[in-house]
Amino acid sequence: MIASLRGALLERGDGSCVIEAGGVGYLVHVSSHTLATLPAAGAEVRLRTRQIVREDALLLFGFADADELRLFDLLIGVSGVGPKLALAALSGLAPAALARAIREEQVAMLVAVPGIGRKTAERLVVELRDKLDFMPLSAGPAATRAREARLLPRSERFDDAVAALTTLGYSAVQAQEAVRRVAGEEEDLTLETIVKRALSRLSKPAVLSR
């Protein structure tokens, strides 16, 4: 079982990357969350991994942090959820947002993820809502101050903004980049303002080009 992988990042694509370790190039499937954390090609990278063995394939999935891996393991333990659907869920919503949607029984938000139907979403809620204590609910004292000011904690606002944009048809990578840029403009923005400004940026592709 391959538990982690460290080596040079050879290439990155949509939902996967190739890491060379010991002279061997490994194709690793990753979520958009992990993909966004990867360095430039040629740089060293380390990912936690989960190896899935099938009769017709040997698949390797990579994760930027332990919480995302743990959430992946919980997802594939749900009936009807395979590794590719679990990865799609982690791409459609940031790990913290996905965990919160399950805990708070936000079925509509889960169904907005491509590949997840209503029955699957309801199954995720029933089977996992009491197993996500390891995922943070808030950002501590800062979160309390934010709520007193009628604002969601910063991380929750950004996760929810990304989720809202993905339901409108934007990819998780596009949504995360737009929200990240809006976040750098001003502190203490409301969720509604973040979404509006991100939509404005997304309507101008040149602004988000690299």
Image (spheres, helix red, strand yellow):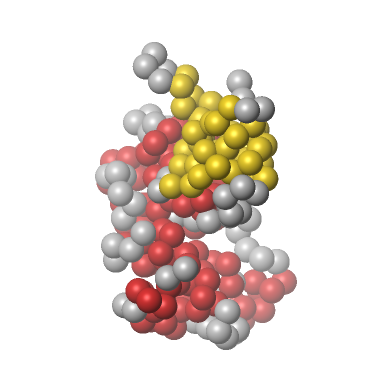
Which one is nearer the viewer's eye here, 28 or 67?
28
In this rendering, does residue 130 appear at all? Answer: no
Q: Residue at x 43, y 50 (%)?
A: 91
* Residue 69 rendering spot, x and y as whole percentages: 58, 39
Which one is nearer the viewer's eye here, 74 or 172?
172
Q: Is residue 13 above or below residue 162?
A: above
Question: In which quadrant of the rendered image does the N terminus lie?
Answer: top right
As drawn, the residue found furthest toward the right would be 141
Q: Residue at x 52, y 38 (%)?
A: 18
* Residue 28 rendering spot, x and y as whole percentages: 51, 36
Q: Is residue 115 above or below residue 151?
A: above
* Residue 194 rendering spot, x and y as whole percentages: 46, 79
Total marks in image = 0
User: Residue 209 occupies which quadrant of the picture?
Assistant: bottom left
**Along the horizontal axis of the image, is 144 left or right of 182?**
right
Q: Residue at x 48, y 72 (%)?
A: 179
**Along the horizontal axis of the image, is 37 left or right of 75?**
right
In this rendering, does residue 41 appear at all? Answer: yes
Which one is nearer the viewer's eye here, 199 or 86?
199
Q: Residue at x 43, y 39 (%)?
A: 86
* Residue 193 rendering spot, x and y as whole percentages: 44, 83
User: Residue 84 occupies which quadrant of the picture?
Assistant: top left
